[in-house]
Amino acid sequence: MTHPLIDRLETELGWPRLRDRAAVEAFVAAPGPHCLFVPGDPARNLETADAAVILPEVRAAFQNAFDCAIVDDAIENAIRQEYRALKTPGFLFFRAGAFLGDIQKIRDWDDYLARTAQLLSLAEA
């Protein structure tokens, strides 16, 4: 199931929707830091729509230092299991194919800023 705010990430912001494992691997292996948006089911989780608004703002706060993609429903469960990001919505951060960590569920704005800064600093190590 999709939601207009998630669709907006794809149609207006140009974020790719990753529909299979190969697409995920190619996206996270590219140079630079990356964030996978794992939305969850917007019909059952009201936080999903909030996260679809928050992630572009977090990205902007870091001057677009990382790119983003949407994990499609078809592979979401497998990705969540693989990276132990079991709560949705989730933001999973990578650099050069390496998993750096995640932010699960809706948080306070300061938590997003602190955790994202921490994850991006790990990327530079």
Image (cartoon, rainbow, N blue to C red):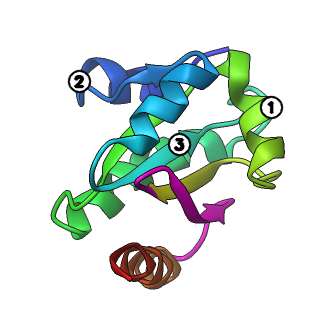
Determine contact: label 2, label 1, CB under 8 Å: no
Q: Quadrant of residue 73?
A: top right
> Which amino acid lies under the numbered mark 3 shown in the image of this protein?
Phe
- Relative to 102, is 118 on the left or the right? left
Say which of 113 and 4 sits in front. 113
> Which amino acid lies under the numbered mark 2 shown in the image of this protein?
Glu
What is the number of the mark on residue 77?
Answer: 1
Identity of the residue drawn at 40% across and 78% down: 113
Q: Mark 1 or mark 2, which is nearer the start of the sequence?
A: 2
Q: How many marks?
A: 3
> Which amino acid lies under the numbered mark 1 shown in the image of this protein?
Asn
According to the picture, the residue beneath numbered tag 2 turns out to be 12
Identity of the residue drawn at 46% across and 21% down: 17
Q: Quadrant of residue 81?
A: top right
Q: Nearer the viewer, mark 2 or mark 1?
A: 1
Q: Mark 1 or mark 3, which is nearer the start of the sequence?
A: 3
- Relative to 80, is 32 on the left or the right? left
Residue 41 in sight? no
Q: CA distance from mark 3 to mark 1?
A: 13 Å
Residue 101 in sight? yes
